[in-house]
Image: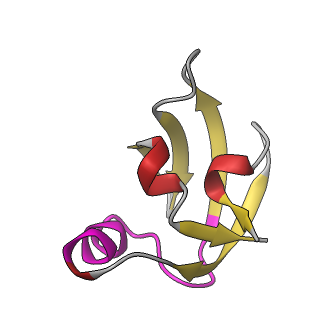
């Protein structure tokens, strides 16, 4: 299973599944990250947290813990 955290900088990946429970999963979905959405990895902070992505035409910063809950291909 490949997660968003494992994706390479500069690549575009497609969301396969969201893991997590309740409020955490809902918050990720509210940010526009849903199944079959394309996510472009723009850059990652020097220590790996947070990472900046482009989703649905806007830029978004995600914590490493949240990125691990997003399964991609």
Q: What residue is drawn where x is 66% and y is 44%?
A: 41
Is 18 situated above or below 62?
A: below
Q: Which residues are magenta?
A: 23-38
In terms of depth relative to the viewer, which is nearer, 47 or 58?
47
| Residue 48 vertical placement versus 17 (above, below) | above
Residue 45 is situated, as x and y percent measured from the top left of the image, at: 54, 21
> If the image is split into quadrants, where does the C terminus sit?
bottom right
Which of the two residues, 17 or 32, is positioned nearer the viewer here?
17
Rendering coords of residue 65 (x, y %): 44, 49
Q: Going 33% across and 75% down the picture, which residue do you hit?
A: 25
Relative horizontal placement of residue 23, taking residue 39 as reference (left or right): left
In the image, taking residue 20 as reference, residue 55 lies left or right, namely right
Q: Position of residue 39 (x, y in %)?
A: 62, 60
Q: Residue 15 sits in which quadrant?
A: bottom right
In this rendering, is residue 12 above or below 37?
above
In this rendering, would 23 be left or right of 51?
left
Of all residues shown, which one is farthest toward the top? 46
Q: Is residue 59 magenta?
A: no
Q: Is residue 24 left or right of residue 66?
A: left
Question: In the image, what residue occupies the spot 54% across and 49% down?
Answer: 54
Residue 70 lies, with reference to residue 16, above or below; the image says above
Q: Residue at x 75, y 49 (%)?
A: 7
């Amino acid at each position: 299973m490949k997660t968003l955290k494992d994706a390479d900088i500069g690549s575009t990946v497609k969301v396969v599944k969201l893991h997590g429970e309740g409020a955490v999963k809902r918050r990720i979905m509210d940010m526009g990250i849903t199944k079959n959405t394309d996510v472009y990895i723009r850059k990652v902070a020097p220590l790996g947290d947070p990472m900046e992505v482009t989703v649905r035409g806007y830029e978004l910063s995600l914590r490493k813990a949240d990125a691990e809950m997003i399964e991609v291909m």
